[in-house]
Image: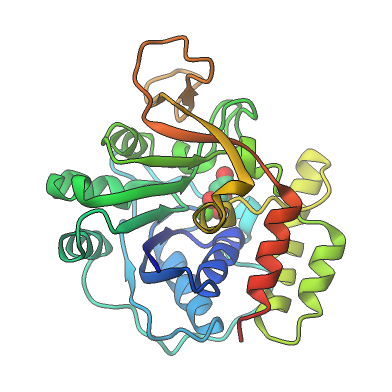
Amino acid sequence: AQKIIIDTDPGQDDAVAILLALASPEIEVLGLVAVAGNVPLALTELNTRKICELAGRPDLPVHAGCAAPLERKLVTAEHVHGKTGLDGIELPEPAMQLRPGHGVDFIIDTLRREPAGTVTLVPIGPLTNIAEAFRRAPDIVARVGRIVLMGGAYFEVGNITPTAEFNIYVDPEAARIVFRSGAPLVVLPLDATHEALTGRDWVEAMRALPNRCGPAVASWTDFFERYDREKYGSQGAPLHDPCAIAWILRPELFEGREINVEIETQGEFTTGMTVADWWRVSDRPANALFIRHLDRDGLFALISERIARLP
Ligand code: BDR
Ligand code: CA
């Protein structure tokens, strides 16, 4: 199985991503690290534990990572995810404990322990923890198999500013470190994830599953959908973060290009923008597989088939 570390800020779509990974035998989750993002760290680490328990995996190591971006004040997204970050369904206080040790150390130690090239990092929140790990332990960069992240936007422009996507915008300095690290990168930007809109029938099918995870997914997406409906007038909630896990499972559902992507950190109006050289007009070398489109029906069929396997 493909070994992964999930770096996350749940987040309803993070929650679905985590469930998708835990339901998939092709993936072995070595651990989860929480980061400050959608809501502050105290909530994202709590939510991560709640999700693991819901999935029947209280055995998994969950670590708390960085509480703030490298150089900036934290920007959160309660307007999208609600006060808890995981509004939509009330989950019990988790019995599983946070593991001792900083999440950044967990990332460093795991990459040093596992054979080089065998671990995939899956950041689905701001890139603070990954950048901090690379900064503290540059030797681990060459040991990373691949980074598959949700973040950025190019043709779809931004969702937190006119030009920036939330995960990159929250910690652009961290994003720059990761995009320039030389580690193989797969990027799932809004260009792709805005095609991953839930449909009514799909949500109702989730709700009707005879387990507890299906109805939880339905409640989360119902809550998540409200924002997009009011803001964009769109039908359905975009399942951004599950796309990163789905790419690992079924890369043929996605299409993109190997291109250069730089992170704007100084722009007056464009800080946090992923400057994607889609037409290869610069001579900067490619550093990322930048995904532009996905097979929506294939993606949702995959997610429902997997969620049905959970408790
Ligand atoms: C990203 O921002 C967060 O709000 C979501 O969880 C996702 O990771 C989408 O821009
Ligand atoms: Ca997220």
> In the displayed structure, does residue 136 sit left or right of residue 8?
left
Residue 138 in which image quadrant: top left
User: Farthest bottom residue?
Assistant: 95
User: Is the residue 50 above or below the residue 107 in the image?
Assistant: below
Which quarter of the image is occupied by the N terminus? bottom left
- Tell me residue 54's x, y (percent): 56, 82
> Residue placed at 16% from the left, 66% from the top?
113
- Residue 102 locus on image (x, y percent): 23, 66
Q: Please state if 70 lies on the left or on the right of 13 as rendered.
A: left
**Quadrant housing residue 264:** top left
Q: Is residue 162 above or below residue 80?
A: above
Image: 36 above or below 161? below
Residue 111 in the image: state x and y as whole percent: 21, 59
Which of 210 and 26 lies nearest the eye of the viewer?
A: 26
**Which quadrant would the C terminus be assigned to in this image?**
bottom right
| Residue 65, horizontal then vertical, whole percent | 31, 61
Q: State the residue in front, 308 or 66.
A: 308
Asked whether residue 197 appears in the rendered view, the answer is no
Asked if residue 239 shows in the view, the reply is yes
